[in-house]
Image (cartoon, rainbow, N blue to C red):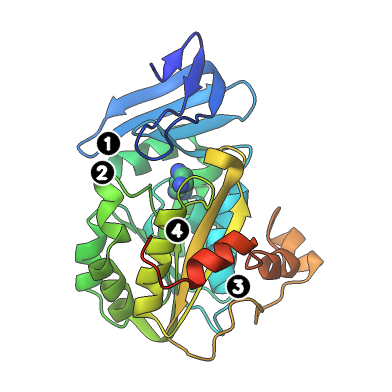
Amino acid sequence: MNVMQSGWFSEVNDYLWPGVALSLEVEKVLHHECSKYQDILVIKTKSHGKALILDNVIQCTEKDEYAYHEMISYLPLCSHPNPKDVLIIGGGDGGAAREVAKHPDVERVTLVDIDNRVIEICKDYLPRLSLGLNNPKVSIHACDGLQYLKDHHGKFDVIITDSCDPVGPAEHLFEQPYYELLKAALKPGGIIASQAGTVWESIEQVKNTFELCKNTFPVAAYAVTAVPTYPTGQIGFVMGSLDDKTNFTEPIRIFSDDDLDEMEMKYYNDKIHRAAFVLPRFVEMKLSSNKKN
Ligand code: SPM
């Protein structure tokens, strides 16, 4: 099936989510190119504002991106006692950088994305997302995340992996050596959070990524958020902490409603933080089982 048909974009992927596809009616194609790493498409949709699509997979739409970016940022940030230095691997659209930079304790945000074209195109076409890239706390490096981690041991309080799915350029970000590098790049007591798939169409990916995290960190957890334009409307994050006393399910930094208003937060609060770790029974059983598949 052609992903662009009769004015609709369809997110068809026989490998990642066979037999199911979300479609968005297209008002205009704003940009399309093949970078050195991937196919990059920006469209204006009729219902969800602008959308960034990499290798035919929806990365974010203006209508619901905050449900992903606030959660991938504030679940780890509010689980850390003093998150000063934050590294984002991926996230070239700037959405996670925008959110992380709002946290009053964060002093430096380092963003490492392998594809400079994603960064440039998002600056040109998606200003509501990419405004994070212009924040003075944020420094940007267009290079390989694995190499960056190898060169920066013990430097970060929080590392967020805001990646694509585990095919193409992001495949290595779902493997054990990457998790070892994450661990080595953290300061004592450091915390990681990584995009880890959805329980409805990729429970094996969730299980595998959770296992990597559990094998690497003394404390590991899986949390979910609702994003209507991801397959099945749901996506999750694995989280790991070097501090064996971390309890991810109870935020240690709680922002008041006034704080959240001032920070222009639309999704995250302490209640949804706690709720994100409450999982359906089949997921709890899958993640606690010793069986490989
Ligand atoms: N800054 C936004 C980048 C988004 N990164 C995650 C994209 C995931 C898209 N596919 C979801 C499929 C879940 N299995």
Tell me, yes or no, whether the two marked residues, 4 and 2, touch with CB atoms within 8 Å: no
- Disc 1 C-beta below 8 A from ligand 1: no
Task: Give the secondary structure at mark 1.
Answer: loop
Which residue does the numbered mark 3 point to in the structure image? 104
Q: Earlier in the sequence, mark 1 or mark 4?
A: 1
Whole-angstrom CA distance, mark 4 to mark 2, is 18 Å
Q: Amino acid at mark 2?
A: Gly
Q: Quadrant of residue 257?
A: bottom right
Residue at 39%, 72% (x, y): give it: 213
Q: Amino acid at mark 4?
A: Val
From the image, tell me which residue sits under label 1. Answer: 38
Residue 49: where, in percent of width, then height?
60, 29
Quarter of the figure with the N terminus: top left
Q: Nearer the viewer, mark 1 or mark 2?
A: 2
| Amino acid identity at mark 3 | Pro
- From the image, state whether disc 2 or disc 3 is nearer to you: 2
Instruction: Give the residue pinned by disc 4.
Output: 206
Q: Tell which circle, 4 or 2, labels the residue nearer the N-terminal end.
A: 2
Count numbered badges in the picture: 4
Q: Earlier in the sequence, mark 1 or mark 3?
A: 1
Label 1–label 2 contact, CB within 8 A: yes
Q: Reply above or below: 141 against 11.
A: below
Q: Which mark is residue 168?
A: 2
Q: Residues within 10 Å of mark 1 (few under 14, many from 20)?
A: some
